[in-house]
Image: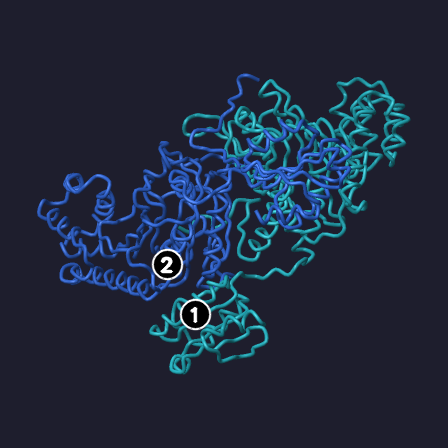
Chain colours: A cyan, B blue
Amino acid sequence: MSKIHLSTLKGFNDYFSEDMIIREFVVEKFKTIAKKYGFEGLETPALEYTELILGQSGLEAEKLYYRFQDNGGRDVMLKYELMTSMCRAVAQNINSLVFPYKRYQVQPVWRAENIQKGRLREFTQMDIDIIGSSSMYTDSEVLMIGVEFLNELGFKNYKARISSRKILEGVLEFLKIEKEKFTDFYITVDKIKKIGEENVKAELADRGFSTKDIEQIISILNTKDIVELESTIGTTETGKKGIEEVKEILEILQASNIDNNKYCFDITLARGLASYTGPIWEFEVIDGGVGSVSGGGRYDNAISKFVNREVPATGTSFGLERLVQIIKDRKMGEFSKTNIEVIILAMDKEYLNIAIDTASILRNEKVNTMIFPTTEKINNFLKYADKKSIPWAIIIGETEKNNDVLLLKNMSTSEQFVVKKEDVLKKIINK
Amino acid sequence: MSKIHLSTLKGFNDYFSEDMIIREFVVEKFKTIAKKYGFEGLETPALEYTELILGQSGLEAEKLYYRFQDNGGRDVMLKYELMTSMCRAVAQNINSLVFPYKRYQVQPVWRAENIQKGRLREFTQMDIDIIGSSSMYTDSEVLMIGVEFLNELGFKNYKARISSRKILEGVLEFLKIEKEKFTDFYITVDKIKKIGEENVKAELADRGFSTKDIEQIISILNTKDIVELESTIGTTETGKKGIEEVKEILEILQASNIDNNKYCFDITLARGLASYTGPIWEFEVIDGGVGSVSGGGRYDNAISKFVNREVPATGTSFGLERLVQIIKDRKMGEFSKTNIEVIILAMDKEYLNIAIDTASILRNEKVNTMIFPTTEKINNFLKYADKKSIPWAIIIGETEKNNDVLLLKNMSTSEQFVVKKEDVLKKIINK
């Protein structure tokens, strides 16, 4: 017995009442907004064939897989992200789905990461994606939803930084650097916010970029205004396309009356994933302390390669635990410790009927009501209600039973009321 | 490329829009009722140390584990059920939790089962449990919630069959059969509904029960009325206690005004799990074709053995996929194929603003609205709306733009209306 670890695995958490209230609040907001914009639900399995995911997320990622052989000898793994699994589901159902297809998905994923604040091994992604349209309206919509979602959660100081893989490709094209170096390039550029300009220069040099190219790259990366880029990388085919696309997104966002402090063009954003092909973005809560809370972009080839037909796609992924972490750290919103609103004590087994009737009246009006399961001394009962932070307590003793009333106590003010069973609801709701 | 399996693993499903609508409906009902009765949310990890679960669920079950070594060499497994994981979480937090502790939990579990209708390898359990009270009121409450939940889902013909492990123990005590045979006994009795009386007799004989004992066992198992049992097994200590407990549950259910067709005492129910110690039950949808939809009971030792202190517990587990299967098979309820209520087409890119404004008006009133992401021919657009079963379509063409109106089409009746943007909501809601 004593040998059994009474613990979760490292990076795996239990979530109790208070956490669950915040988690469910965030997930509910996300789903409601996604539905409002016409997204439909999707769930895919926790386990997938490894071959599906292998090679999708880079060698570094593969070290983080929860991969094993199942009882049937299949090479399987816990899903690393929702996107690849969704692409598989879409490709598999390509003939029955109607495109454009818009789905939201809220499910856990697993990565054997080193653990640090806001970085778990099991965490929940909240994704929206629009499949089957190349229109920049879809990218813009994904961004609009991100802004609406963060607003609704009560965030004030956040920003969507927007760039494009095509613009980054344009940099290489403009400088006449070989296409083969693109992965080296964007992986390095992606670190500029974290490691700074000097380290990016050094890394680019290590990766074989010439001093002259590096100077020009850094100079271009310092361009804040997208229009200015037209004179340099805008002269290349890919760069021009990338600039046009991002400008179109920015125009649609402006037409949507979104506060223009909430988004900006940022050429230094590159995003690590190999699958991006066009616009990319990250949502960052300023001073949130947990990195970005959402990242996404366009990935026009991820599904196409399974089905031999064009299936453009775009989307974004929010991290539930990171959002909850900031909400908790900043004590945003007024979250109760418990969803129990009223607790009832029958001081004698014979009064249990009265407790059940009273609970019934309250529950019919959606008041969450717990009946204390045994008789108990009033003090112990009130101590319980207090420890659990339950706002209202009802006591049914001999006096109450004989006079056909209830003793109602407001746990935060300590006020007591003697009320008829039928009136208890009014008292609680009016308070 | 062509070698990649575009399929889920056997027994693992994708759930698209229509399924998700029913799944979310069922889960939402479950959570709402659980909260109404004062249960709080809990989530535990998908992976646990294997040693925690090993030996909890019987040798047969162990063959069904998804068990492997993680990158750190830990012997881990995907959780087989929610209960053991919850017991671990409770034991681990024994000093911070306040008892009685009531929690609901809705999460997937994994079993490498042979696949058949309503039996998947990944499925979702919806559990409620009350920890830290021996009161029969808690068992009764779990049953009340089960009845309310099935009622709310629209089921009419279902039944909770209730028995007790103590009553079954009483049978052996009464017949003076060794206690060691109890597991053999209840595992065999548990099959009586499936394999019939004769096969149970044969199996009991195989397991070493005497012909005389078998005759008496079968005679007792044929007792329908709990009061009749008092003259036989009620004369034993354990049997008496078991009968008292079940009678108390039946009384509380009666006092709660629950239709007494919805529950009954059934001594032949035994439930396979080793952990049960008192009252046990199953909810069965009559002619549902998927076996029981919920099973549970009291398990007073499951947590205690981790923490060296008494922690009585009771609860029940509903199977989401089984409930959804019956709801779909019987076409219960009116579920839409999609949650999209309105779809809007801007026939020219220049009218996208009008589409966004119109969508905004609708979304503000919680009408789920999709903007078609590109310009499109009206016929193709209407075909899309039709295929997706979206009830309302809005078209913004040149005429509409010039006259500051929208063309609104009811997709089921084919009626068309020319309306002002501000009036579109009224038209849709009134219909």
Percent x, y for residue B34?
A: 46, 56
Q: Residue at x 36, y 74 (%)?
A: A351
Q: Is residue B48 visible?
A: no
Q: Is residue B328 visible?
A: yes
Query: In which image quadrant can residue A223 be found?
Result: top right
Percent x, y for residue B67?
A: 44, 36
Number of on-image labels: 2
Three-letter code, disc 1? Thr
Q: Chain of mark 2?
A: B
Rendered position, B77 above or below A390: above
Q: Chain of mark 1?
A: A
Q: Residue at x 79, y 41 (%)?
A: A255
Three-letter code, disc 2? Met
Query: In which image quadrant can residue A131 be found?
Result: top right
- Circle 2 crowding by C-alpha within 10 Å: few under 14, some 14–19, many from 20: many
> Badges 1 and 2: C-beta atoms under 8 Å apart?
no
Q: Name the residue beneath numbered marker 1.
A: A358
Seen from the viewer's position, the closer of residues A385 and A61 is A385
Q: Residue at x 48, y 38 (%)?
A: B19
Percent x, y for residue A308?
A: 60, 18
